[in-house]
Image (cartoon, coloured by chain):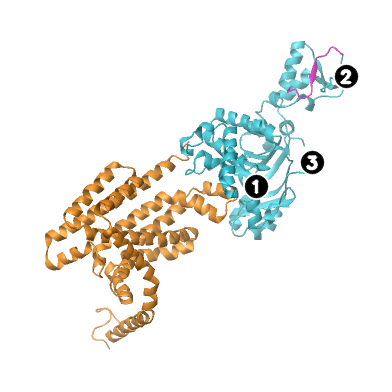
Amino acid sequence: MAKNAWWIEFPQMERETLVAIRKALDGAYRDFSRSYGDVIEAVFEPLLYFLVWFEKLLLNAPWWSVLLAVCALAYLTSRSWKIVAGAIVAFLFIGFFGMWEDTMSTMSMIAVSTLLAIALGVPVGILMARSNRTQAVVTPLLDVMQTMPAFVYLIPVVMLLGIGKVPGLLAVVIYAIPPVIRLTNLGIRLVDREVLEASDAFGASGWQRLVGVQIPLAFPTIMAGVNQTIMMALAMVVIASMIGVQGLGQPVLRSITNQYFTLGLLNGLAIVALAIIFDRVSQAYGKRLQLQYKQAHHG
Amino acid sequence: MAEPMIRIQGLYKIFGAAGEAVLPMVRDGMGKQELLDTHGCVLGLRDINMSVPPRCIQVVMGLSGSGKSTLIRHINRLIAPTAGEIIVDGTDVAGMDGATLREFRRHRASMVFQRFALMPHRSVRDNVAYGLTVQGLQSADVEKRASRWIERVGLQDFADRYPGELSGGMQQRVGLGRALATDPDILLMDEAFSALDPLIRYDMQNMLLDLQTELKKTIVFITHDLDEALRIGDNVAILRDGGMVQQGKPQDIVLTPADDYVADFVKDVNRGKLVRVESIMKPGTTCASAPAIPIGTRLERAALALSEAAAKLGKVTDRDGTALGIVSQLDLLDAMVRRRRPSP
């Protein structure tokens, strides 16, 4: 007989049972990560190589060549000199205040995690668009991924892979992938039915229809998703630094523990500068593509 | 008549999950509304039988909801039939497997759509080339054939533009060019000109008729516009509520409508411009001085010829001038103005 009647105090489960459940689950997961941790780490090995290689590339290249590459990329995608000028100013500011190396680390992290998110997210989005059942399964998963506090899924990732670059990358990708999946799904579902019918009528196979019609027409929407993914990846940089990811997050983390306000502010501003550049470049690219298609069906 | 290019036999289409299950009831004559109320199925087509001779323009006419767009989509199986056969050049389209069907769509039949359905991300050139790209042809070949068709539909100055930059009429020329570029035997035109302004529509009809004298395709043309149907159709079929009401030559439909529905449809048609004199001529002979009216003359012209000659009777002659029969002013007048009732 409980101390209080069930209508006064919530009839919760026994403390011992709860502890037992937690122990059982934690134990099972620990056993799993002990026995399969190495295998899973081996799977991510190539990713680690790529990440390290890319980071070294950015760090070892002379600063002006990196700046030149960034400007060229910004111009090619956005065709806007204003954005290029903004990028130059931002990078000079970053370099002058001694944050160049951390910025390169962060950029390589963002680049690799965005590529990974696109490589995984676009196919998932396509599958979602093809079947309502897949959509019904994946949508709640994405909801959970987006609302679950990032710290919570750092735990299993760290248990599985320890701390370092790969678990950091994984955490960033989990956090940042939902927009690209959602918007790929949406973009493909929004493709004009009549255009699809036309492609069927000319005998296009499923693949020809996907590659020739659905993806190109969904592309501006997919780009909006990529833009969101980049922004979320940047937002994750500080949190990921807690599990050993190098970059602009590290000094911020140090500033929190040591109360270095200026250091924190400068690195925070550097993250903001990167975010603005990435955002403007990817948005301008999406807009430029959209302009081409926009007037269709308004003849 | 030659072996038909397209032969549709006993075609039924019932939309809805229980389509096949309710088919027997529909065959027994269950109506559209009753079917919807009792089984939640929509009757698309009911017992369609139709033959389209090769190299002719077959118009299928009906108001919206009559099933005409559903019918044309059965010919390239964008919609699969509930029952029946669609035999194109000896092969049943309904029985084709996926690969055969794709081949059929790539090479034998192409389609022009009411709202153009162009690919907004491809230039005019790439839109016209779409069917060829889908066939997997080499780019040099594609380029050559696409260019020829772009020129043929008069868009050579716009080849690098995007569909969004063109007017409706020009967009549909792209649609026509795209359909013709694969050199299909069959052209399916689903209200192809209905979205265009009357003047542009008239131009496009002329362009189609021009192309047809040269290309001799088998064309199935859907429209809700009677004038358009009578103008371009070698044969006209009239659909109503998913069923076939009447099929025949344009002037037969105008002169002898099958029922009140068709009679109502054709009551305002200018028969003088449509009907040819041989269809109302009577056997008989007349004096040699009677004006000769060559076979194929429209009633209006014939009436003008008689009134100019101040004659009551004219003789209808064939191309060599041999008299075939006679036609009177009264007959002409009657054929042009009297309201026709359906033949009992």
In primary-sequence order, the first of circles 3 and 2 is 3
| Residue B34 percent location from the top left of the image | 62, 53
Q: Secondary structure at mark 1?
A: helix
The residue that label 2 is drawn on is: B285
**Are labels 3 and 2 assigned to the same chain?**
yes
Label 1, label 2: how many angstroms apart (C-alpha)?
Answer: 53 Å
Q: Nearer the viewer, mark 3 or mark 1?
A: 1
Residue type, label 2? Thr
Along the line of sight, which residue is nearer the eye, B63 or A204? A204
Chain letter for mark 3, please. B
- The secondary structure making up most of the magenta span is loop
**B270 falls in the magenta region:** no
Badge 1, how many Cα within 10 Å: few under 14, some, many 20+? some
Label 3, label 1: how many angstroms apart (C-alpha)?
Answer: 22 Å
Does residue A118 appear to the left or right of A153 in the view shown? right
Chain letter for mark 1, please. B
**B297 falls in the magenta region:** yes
In this orientation, does residue A163 appear? yes
The residue that label 1 is drawn on is: B107
Label total for image? 3
As drawn, the chain in cyan is B
Looking at the image, residue B245 lies above or below residue B306: below
The residue that label 3 is drawn on is: B2
**Are labels 1 and 2 assigned to the same chain?**
yes
Residue visible at 44% across and 62% down in the picture = A124
